[in-house]
Amino acid sequence: MDLTSPAFAEAGPIPVGHTGEDGDRSPPLRWRQVPAGTAAFALVMEDPDAPPGTWVHWVLYDIPGTARELPEAVERREELPDGSRHGLCWGVDRFERLGYHGPLPPPGPAHRYVFHLYALDQPLRLPSGRTARQVREAMASHVLAEATLTGLYAARRS
């Protein structure tokens, strides 16, 4: 499976409009080469370079298996019209926000932001508001394929 974004290239800079510094809109994502039998997708975006540990920025699951993209600026609602559900994010151990919350690193070197897309053999059917850990536990025996896309971002503020 292959995951890309028209907003930035693999290992390229994430545009500021997709960060917590300006706009905070989720970037558009596209995927292809989906394995046969895919019934749903799950997406987790994380910053493995955050000082306190891996910081979760986005959790979205039960994306329909027929989907091949997410538009820019996905709404921050518990459940989207297509049945996709947002999980809780914005933290390492404590998660309080629903929907996409973009890069907002402390001053210093660029952080990596890794989008993980999982093709699943069945929807998870979890209520909205689950954490990345809960989603990963629920999908453990249902992953058909995984694709990643990594963007970089360094704080503009000092």
Image (cartoon, helix red, strand yellow):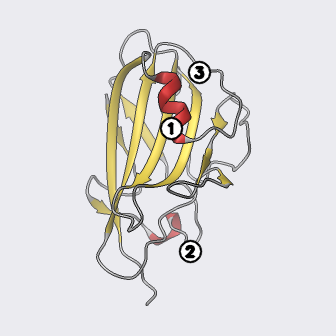
Residue furthest top in the image: 37
Q: Quadrant of residue 64?
A: top right
- In the rendered image, residue 148, in percent from the top left (x then y), is placed at 33, 41
- Residue 149 shown left or right of residue 123 in the figure: left
How far apart marks 3 and 1 lie (CA) works out to 13 Å
For label 1, the SS is helix
Q: Quadrant of residue 73?
A: bottom right
Query: Which amino acid, mark 2?
Result: Asp
How far apart marks 2 and 3 lie (CA) works out to 33 Å
Q: Nearer the viewer, residue 69 or 143?
A: 143
- In the rendered image, residue 70, in percent from the top left (x then y), is placed at 53, 40
From what the image shows, is residue 150 above or below residue 117?
Answer: below
Q: Given contact means CB atoms under 8 Å apart, are the residues at marks 3 and 1 in contact? A: no
**Which comes before the other along the chain, label 2 or label 3?**
2
Q: Residue at x 52, y 40 (%)?
A: 132
Residue at numbered disc 2 = 22
Q: Nearer the viewer, mark 3 or mark 1?
A: 1
Q: Nearer the viewer, residue 135 or 152?
A: 135
**Which comes before the other along the chain, label 1 or label 2?**
2
Query: Which amino acid, mark 3?
Result: Leu
- Residue 4 shown left or right of residue 124 in the figure: left
Q: Residue at x 39, y 34 (%)?
A: 31
Residue at numbered disc 3 = 124
Residue at numbered disc 1 = 133
Crowdedness near tag 2: few (<14), some (14–19) or many (≥20) residues, C-alpha within 10 Å:
few
Q: Given contact means CB atoms under 8 Å apart, are the residues at marks 1 and 2 in contact? A: no
Crowdedness near tag 1: few (<14), some (14–19) or many (≥20) residues, C-alpha within 10 Å:
few
- In the rendered image, residue 85, in percent from the top left (x then y), is placed at 66, 35
